Amino acid sequence: MTKLHVSTTINGEPVEFLCDPGDTMLDALRGPLGLTGSKEGCASGDCGACSITLDDRLVCSCLMLAVEAEGRDLQTIEGMASGDRLHPLQQKFLEMAALQCGICTSGMLVASDALLRKNPKPSEEEVRFWLAGNLCRCTGYDKIVRAVMETADEMREAAQ
Amino acid sequence: MNVISNNKWIGQRTIRPDGADKVTGRAAFAADTNMPGMIWGKVLRSPHPHARIKSIDTSKAEALPGVKAVVSARDIVDFPVDKSVMLGIQDMRWMCRNVMAREKALFPGHPIAAVAATTEAIAAHACELIEVDYEVLPWSIEIDDAIRPDAPILHDFLTFEGKPSNIAGKLEVKKGDIEQGFREAEVVIERSFSTRPVHQGYIEPHACLVSVGADNKTTIWSSSQGQFMVRAMTAYLTGIPQSDIRAIPAEIGGGFGGKTIVYLEPLATLLAKKSGRPVKMVMTREEVMRATGPTSGSKSTVKIGAKKDGTIVAAQGTFWLQAGALPGSPIRGAVGCSFSPYDIPHVLAVGFDVLSNRSKVAAYRAPGAPIGAYAVECVLDELAEALRMDPLELRLKNAAKQGTKAAFGPVFPRIGYIETLEAAKAHPHYTAPLGKWQGRGVASGFWFNAGGESSAQVNITEDGNVVVTTGHPDVGGSRAAIANICAELLGIDYKRVSVLIGDTATIGFSNLTGGSRVLFASAIVVTQSTDKIITTLRERAAKIWEIDPEAVKWENGAAHPASPNAGQFEPLTLAELAAKAPVMGGPIGAGVQLNTEGAEGGFGTHICDVEVDPELGIVRVIRYTAVQDVGRAIHPGYVEGQIQGGVAQGIGWALNEEYIYNKSGKVDNPGFLDYRMPVCSDLPMLDTVMVEVPNPKHPQGVKGVGEVPLVPVMAAVANAIHNALGKRFYSLPMSPPVVLEGMEDPEIRQAAE
């Protein structure tokens, strides 16, 4: 099968890769692009462990074809920290023990970041429904929800 | 003398050593590792629930371009059925038949053959080219079908009461005289219950990468709850000696018991050996759901008798647990744990291990205990109602305490069960008002906990920092707790302690991460190793000062003279002593390997509020408080996390999770959309109360915490639903269709009005 060529932007960097027509974006990220922070838990869009943003929209990269990245702007977990400076959500997840095994954490953080960009002051209910597409089997979500809400508070304060 | 004056790190919510890697995507889970020249393995699985394998023809698959190796049962070491070979609690006779069907395919999804090819697509296509001649056999899925006299027998060589049977085993726990006990009873409640199999539901599918050299030297990267288990099982099943296998534990993306056995590693090893190429295998979610785990479905009958004043005099339980297609359901947990929170003079608990044509069960958080507790704690709720007693009062009146002899054998030392009941009773949650269609339930639970083999190596670096290596995969923060303990003992900042999980070549044997044993056991070997180092540091300071080592104390990260009488010397810090190491006796480090003992059982008591939607049958948990005796919370954040995670899994088990089988004996919901685990919007905040009754047999007072929190949940939810509706449900899950059907009872609406 002939590979297809894709030019795109990932975490602000121009990137080119080759893929099969049937490859998902998650296949491309984890394969030729070597960005294994996005995880495959289901390959059916149910667990959210592969969450990325596509032109600022939260998507499951397992439900997106790799060729659809052509000319678009993608953000993955690998682009969340600035150098050695963690994003406030990343820092808060560590401080509040909002992760256990860590397999859902990349997706949780990407999804939480997407939420706070849209809604800097989410209610608990808004956080819970926004993250309903990201499964976590370890934490019972309690500490994740608290970490997102506390981060939102601190980011708003910092912005003032 | 080691002086720990201010308890600086134990009990602190420190940043976990593996944290930064896990929030940035750097952490390497099993599927994240690749090798040059790597090829892909895929498994051909049985479409039938039960079929004799008459022949397998792999020639077309082998001829497909890109295919590098094909293996089937003839490549796996056979363990004949007439001789048991145990590895821990697993019998290799069943393991060899579980990783690859031998005489028969025993469930849909049972591996028949495996292929390695240059791409995943070619490997999958090659699987389709394998021709298997099956003789399809009658099958059974449910317990009642499997124990009927005319049931299709899975294994002719297994007999029960002299006849071939699907009952693979029986376990009995006894105390007193059960008949005498019920004669003394004034109130007796007897009820029957059923539960469905539920999957551990780890988000990371099983995955491994295996490289085998021409000399058989084998390296395995995989996600498991025990790299030594992976090494031993792979050695058994491939014939490669353990000394030639190096099993490297990848970060594990959830296990909950489900990763305490191997599925892929022996297959990938054989494929790698045959092909001469590194082989990677990753299960799909569908494969995980069809062919791994889950825990047992069950049916049970529990009968409890009490005096009118609430004194329980007799308790009897019969528990039938599904094993799946090969023996080994967790009947020990069901019969051993169910009545253990209570001081009851006459107890009889019997468990049966029942085979049927479904995937072999694997451990799941307190295996067997939640099934038993669900039945027992629901009956206790009815007993309290019949006696007009507060359900926590009934439990308090009968609570096990120091000196109580548990039916499964031991006499309890100082335990914290009563403290959990008292804390629950005093908690504002217990007396908070409830609205319409809302109800409150309570339940308790017990888990044995475990000690066992652990190894640790603690090394001081040349610049005076610390590297700790242990042998247990960290499923939920154990590295953070180990850093706290080591830093505390050495009196240094926890950030100076790195904690790593060694592979099978770099650390001594360490048993599985399971049984709530990891921090209990690791803390002992790390403490003893660190104590040895402190002794060395004191000796070296004594030598420098030319005084007796006994006159040197270790405090706040430095050696000091123990008293003014010892002399006047400037303290020698860890960094200073490390710098002098080359001329003072060499490297500083110590390791300890032990079979740890003294793990004491854990108890919890939960309060659950639910609200029932009468139109849709949806039950929502609206408030939850879990109280648990945790011994000592070394890192409270991850102790709470264990409790909250267990509760969430229990809520899923209670309300939604189940395998749905179709008429052809196949699972119809092998994905996260239809196998409905709790999502974020399903749950409230999960409050925890950590009661700390230190374990006197542990240097820091640690008790296992991971498993207890799942045990009480299903009963707490069921009792809350009863409180909301005045109606009891006796089977799980209490999912919307079930509850809606129950709502047709006209008395319910009247009761709620």
Image: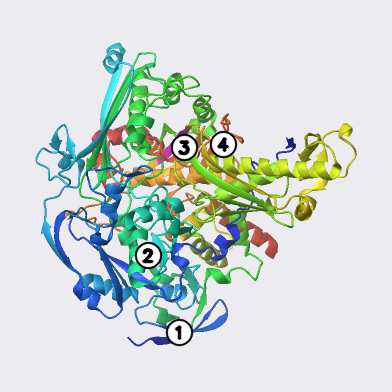
CA distance for labels 2 and 1: 28 Å
Residue type for callout 3? Ala
CA distance for labels 2 and 4: 36 Å
Q: Earlier in the sequence, mark 4 or mark 3?
A: 3
Residue type for callout 2? Val
Q: Residue at x 39, y 60 (%)?
A: B205
Asked if residue B351 lies left or right of residue B309, the reply is left
Magenta extent: B603-610
Residues at discs 4 and 1 in contact (Cβ within 8 Å): no
The kind of secondary structure the magenta stretch mainly shows is strand
- The residue beneath circle 3 is B450
- The residue beneath circle 2 is B282
- The residue beneath circle 1 is A70
Letter of the chain that mark 1 sits on in the rendering: A
Q: Nearer the viewer, residue B119 or B54?
A: B54
Residues at discs 4 and 3 in contact (Cβ within 8 Å): no
Q: Nearer the viewer, residue A129 or B79?
A: B79
Query: Neighbour class for label 2 at 10 Å: few (<14), some, many (≥20)?
Result: many
CA distance for labels 3 and 2: 31 Å
- The residue beneath circle 4 is B702
- Residue B648 against residue B410 in the figure, above or below: below
Q: Residue at x 23, y 60 (%)?
A: B74
Residue B110 position in % (x across, y down)? 24, 57
User: Are callouts 1 and 3 both on one chain?
Assistant: no
